[in-house]
């Protein structure tokens, strides 16, 4: 299993972020080929010192599946869409899940 995590700093317009992210971006992200499961939260900024406003997690079979998804037309569209709502940009990390 391989995990994709996207962390979003607090945007200039949180209401626009929420509306666009949930109604436009997430449905687009859900079309990523090879995406096994995904989840998100817009509630991680409970601490005013937190540098993040929202988080997305996506699960892929392995790093190759993630790479193929992100280089696909759907993946390119997802990446190109980020500036439409995330004025603070995004921090993207991915890593293999190590079972116990």
Image: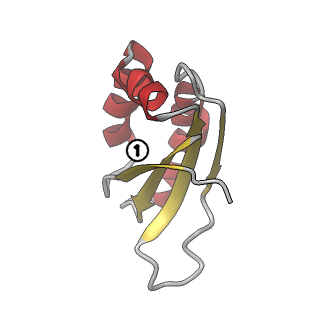
46 or 5, nearer to the observer: 5
Q: Quadrant of the N terminus?
A: top right
Few, some or many residues within 10 Å of mark 1 (<14, 14–19, 20+) = many
- Residue 24 occupies quadrant: top right
Q: Split into 4 quadrants, where in the image is the C terminus?
A: bottom right
Q: Is residue 59 left or right of residue 94?
A: right
At x 52%, y 23%, the residue is: 32
Q: Is residue 3 left or right of residue 6?
A: right
Display colour scheme: secondary structure
Figure check: 58 above or below 100? above
Residue 37: % across, % down: 67, 36
Establish if 92 lies above or below 27. below
Q: Measured from the top left, where is residue 54 in percent x and y?
A: 52, 59
Question: Residue pushed farthest top?
Answer: 73
Q: Note whether 11 is above or below 38 in the view shown.
A: below
Expressed as whole percent of the image width and height from the top left, the position of residue 42 reads 60, 59
Report the front residue among 56 and 12. Answer: 56
- Residue at the image position 44 percent from the left and 57 percent from the top: 7
Give the image quarter of residue 46: bottom right
Q: Nearer the viewer, residue 12 or 91?
A: 91
Residue ID at (31%, 58%) = 88
Q: Secondary structure at mark 1?
A: loop
At 53% from the left and 26% from the top, the residue drawn is: 28
Mark 1 sits on what residue? 85
Residue occupying the far front of the picture:
100
What number of labels is visible? 1
């Amino acid at each position: 299993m391989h995990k994709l995590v996207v962390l979003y700093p607090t945007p200039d317009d949180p209401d626009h972020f929420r509306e666009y992210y949930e109604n436009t971006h997430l449905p687009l992200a859900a079309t990523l080929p090879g995406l096994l499961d995904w989840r998100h939260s817009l509630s991680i900024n409970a601490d005013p010192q937190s540098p993040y406003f929202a988080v997305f997690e996506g699960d892929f079979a392995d790093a190759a599946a993630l790479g193929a998804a992100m280089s696909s037309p759907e993946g390119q569209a997802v990446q190109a869409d980020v500036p439409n709502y995330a004025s603070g940009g995004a921090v993207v990390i991915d890593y293999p899940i190590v079972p116990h």
